[in-house]
Image (cartoon, helix red, strand yellow):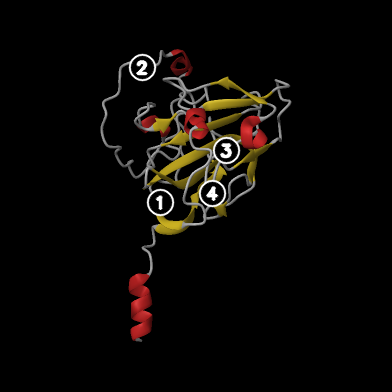
């Protein structure tokens, strides 16, 4: 009885999981260096990520493999519908300057999802294939790296700035090889709502709305509300 109580006391909380520390980061396509791909769109004030296309252009990369950029834990793997389509989110822990840091990587508009929520993945493991979100876009991968672990699919609730996001290629290029490989650590896994997904406004004038260019105040990321919405028309530029 005493042994059971001791083991129970030592067990992690329900919202924590153990995962491997990243030993470095690679590109999500054409691993490890995005061979055969180009960035058709980079990080912008209204587009906090990168779009990767095959050198053949058009739909030439439809069905091509998408890879996890590092060791990590899958926190989201499902059809988010609307402007997102099939999405995978992976939480990564990495060591830098003697400190463990955590980021989320996002892979959107996938044709196929090849991992499940709660799965441990390794650097370079295939997590899906490039898609079009049911023909909404030309085939490409929309890819993000988030500092803010509360965003999830609720991107419209947070400023699209460098307080909440990294510029993906800049982040990766400076962290190709990192210490800490072989280690593991605990992470919090359920920092955002992965349940209810509802549609946003249907006014197509939102597509023509100029992006907000006002600087965002620097402050600690706020936790999301219980329910969230996916705004199809804010996300059509992904």
Residue 188 percent across, percent down from the top left:
39, 53
- State which tag comes first along the sequence, 1 or 3: 3
Q: Residues within 10 Å of mark 2 (few under 14, many from 20)?
A: few
The residue where tag 1 is placed is 190
Q: Which mark is residue 119?
A: none
- Foreground disc of the pair 2, 4: 4
Q: Nearer the viewer, mark 1 or mark 4?
A: 4
Give the distance between the C-alpha atoms of the residues marked 2 and 3, in whole angstroms.
32 Å
Give the class, few, some or many, for how many residues have Cα within 10 Å of label 3's Cα (few <14, many ≥20): many
Q: Is residue 38 left or right of residue 146?
A: right
Residue highlighted by disc 2? 212
2 or 4: tag closer to the N-terminus: 4
Q: Give me the residue at 41% from left, 13% from top.
A: 210
Quarter of the N terminus within the rendering: bottom left
Residue at the image point whose x is 41% and y is 46% from the top: 193
Q: Which residue is mark 3?
A: 26
> Dot 4 corresponds to which residue?
71
């Amino acid at each position: 009885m005493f042994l059971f109580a001791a083991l129970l006391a030592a067990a992690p909380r329900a919202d924590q999981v153990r995962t491997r520390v990243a030993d470095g980061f690679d590109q999500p396509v054409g691993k490890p260096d995005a061979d055969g791909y180009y960035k058709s769109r980079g990080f912008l004030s209204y587009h906090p990520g990168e779009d990767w296309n095959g050198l053949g252009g058009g739909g030439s990369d439809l069905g091509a493999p998408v890879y996890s950029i590092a060791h990590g834990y899958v926190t989201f793997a499902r059809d988010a519908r609307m402007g997102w389509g099939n999405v995978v989110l992976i939480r990564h822990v990495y060591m830098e300057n003697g400190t463990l840091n955590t980021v989320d990587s996002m892979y959107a508009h996938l044709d196929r999802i090849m991992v499940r929520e709660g799965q441990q993945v390794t650097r370079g493991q295939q997590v899906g294939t490039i898609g079009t979100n049911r023909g909404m876009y030309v085939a490409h991968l929309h890819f993000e790296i988030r500092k803010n672990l509360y965003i999830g699919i609720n991107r419209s609730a947070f400023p699209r700035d460098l307080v909440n996001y990294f510029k993906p290629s800049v982040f990766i290029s400076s962290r190709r090889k990192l210490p800490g490989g072989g280690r593991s650590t605990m992470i919090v896994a359920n920092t955002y709502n992965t349940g209810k997904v509802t549609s946003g406004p249907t006014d197509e004038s939102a597509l023509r709305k100029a992006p907000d260019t006002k600087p965002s105040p620097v402050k600690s990321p706020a936790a999301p509300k219980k329910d969230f919405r996916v705004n199809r028309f804010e996300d059509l530029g992904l």
